[in-house]
Every structure is written in C-alpha cells, then in structure tokens.
Image (spheres, rainbow, N blue to C red):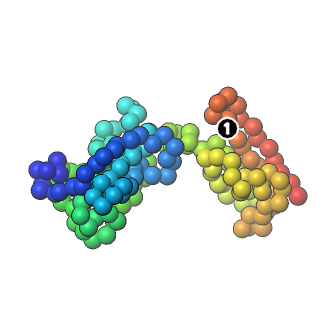
C-alpha cells in the first residue's frame, strides 16, 4: 500500500508479536541507521477483532521507518494523512480500544493487580507486582484524597484465582 503511494519505508529486519504490551498497539525500534524492528500487540491478532485494527497499526509503525518520521511530528502526520485519504484508514498518534474495535475485556485481562481507594473509589491497575502494590499491601500508602484504606484485588494468571485484601491503618 505504501509502495503505491510512493512512500519509501526503511528496512524491516524483524516483525514480532508482543504478548506483554498492554498500553501500546505497536512499537518501532531503530536497530541501526536504517534498520528497524516492529512489534505488534498480540490482542490485535485475535480473530474476533477487526482486521483493520491490525492493518492500521502495522501501517502506523511502518510510517515510523520513513525518513524523517521516527516520531509523531509534522512529517509523520503528513504521511499518515496521505495513507488515510488514499485507503480510508484512521492512522493517528494514539487510538483507544474502542476506536480499534478491541474489547475492553481483552485489554483488562492484562492487568493482575487492581488497587482501589476505599475513600474516593479511585482505581489503579498494574500488570505485575511492583513497589506501589507492595507499599499498599504493607499499609503505608496514602491516596491523593488522603485515604489510607485500600482494597487490593490480585488475579493470578497461572491458577485463575482471585485474592481480595483490604488494608487499614
């Protein structure tokens, strides 16, 4: 498709599927001066999702390999607009799951820790155990609202079990 528009993209030496990415649809990495690696979020390969979501993401990442387009600057936007006009895509800097046609449930399955402040009901989601989760579980965390009591839900991906704990100070 890019060839038909005389858009000259860089040399792609590897395309991979990223099973860990939860906040991005794709990524383009420069491996050398003109060599690139592209990774695509695995949920885009789910056959229940629209093929356009995958195509849109691949084209987005390919555009990053065009000379002068490694960021989302004016040149990249110009190229994205050219592809969008020619083929009816919606290539842009950021896209939501809803815009991609990907269910929120597919994206939610990536998170294993859910922390909720029991005072203001603000929720934070984490993919893995981290310092924040540890501090909350220890009972030494304070929410920006001043709350000190939290509910922590942990979904174990291996066993499928869910553990809910409440912290209090």
Q: Is residue 46 above or below residue 144?
A: above
Total numbered badges shown on the rendered structure: 1
- How far across and down, in percent of the image, does residue 75 sit? 25, 68
In the image as oriented, which residue stretches furthest toward the front? 32
Q: In screen coordinates, is 4 left or right of 120?
A: left
Q: Residue at x 65, y 54 (%)?
A: 124
**SS for tag 1?**
strand
Q: Is residue 101 above or below residue 2?
A: above
Camera-nearest residue between 72 and 46: 72
In the image as oriented, which residue stretches furthest toward the top? 159
Q: Which quarter of the rendered picture does the C terminus lie within? A: bottom right
In the image as oriented, which residue stretches furthest toward the bottom? 74
- How far across and down, in percent of the image, does residue 26 sit? 39, 50
- How far across and down, in percent of the image, does residue 127 sit? 61, 47
Q: In screen coordinates, is 114 left or right of 95?
A: right
Report whether residue 33 is seen: yes
Q: Is residue 46 above or below residue 107?
A: above
Q: Residue at x 52, y 43 (%)?
A: 20
Report whether residue 60 is seen: no
Camera-nearest residue between 162 and 8: 8
Are there few (<14), some (14-19), or many (20+) residues within 10 Å of tag 1? some
Q: Residue at x 28, y 44 (%)?
A: 55
Q: Residue at x 39, y 44 (%)?
A: 40
- How far across and down, in percent of the image, does residue 47 sit? 37, 31
Q: In screen coordinates, is 79 left or right of 161?
A: left
In the image as oriented, which residue stretches furthest toward the right? 169
Camera-nearest residue between 153 and 20: 20
Residue at the spot of label 1? 155
């Amino acid at each position: 498709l890019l060839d038909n528009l005389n858009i000259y993209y860089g040399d792609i030496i590897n395309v991979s599927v990223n099973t860990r990415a939860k906040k991005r649809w794709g990524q383009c990495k420069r491996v050398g001066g003109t060599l690139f690696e592209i990774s695509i979020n695995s949920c885009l390969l789910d056959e229940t999702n629209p093929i356009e979501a995958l195509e849109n993401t691949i084209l987005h990442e390919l555009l990053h390999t065009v000379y002068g387009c490694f960021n989302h600057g004016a040149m990249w936007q110009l190229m994205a607009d050219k592809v969008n006009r020619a083929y009816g895509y919606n290539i842009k800097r950021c896209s939501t799951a809803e815009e991609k046609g990907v269910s929120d449930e597919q994206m939610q399955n990536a998170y294993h820790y859910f922390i909720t402040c029991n005072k203001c009901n603000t929720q934070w989601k984490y993919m893995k155990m981290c310092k924040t989760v540890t501090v909350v579980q220890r009972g030494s965390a304070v929410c920006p609202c001043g709350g000190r009591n939290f509910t922590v839900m942990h979904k174990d991906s291996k066993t499928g079990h869910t553990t809910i704990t409440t912290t209090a100070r």
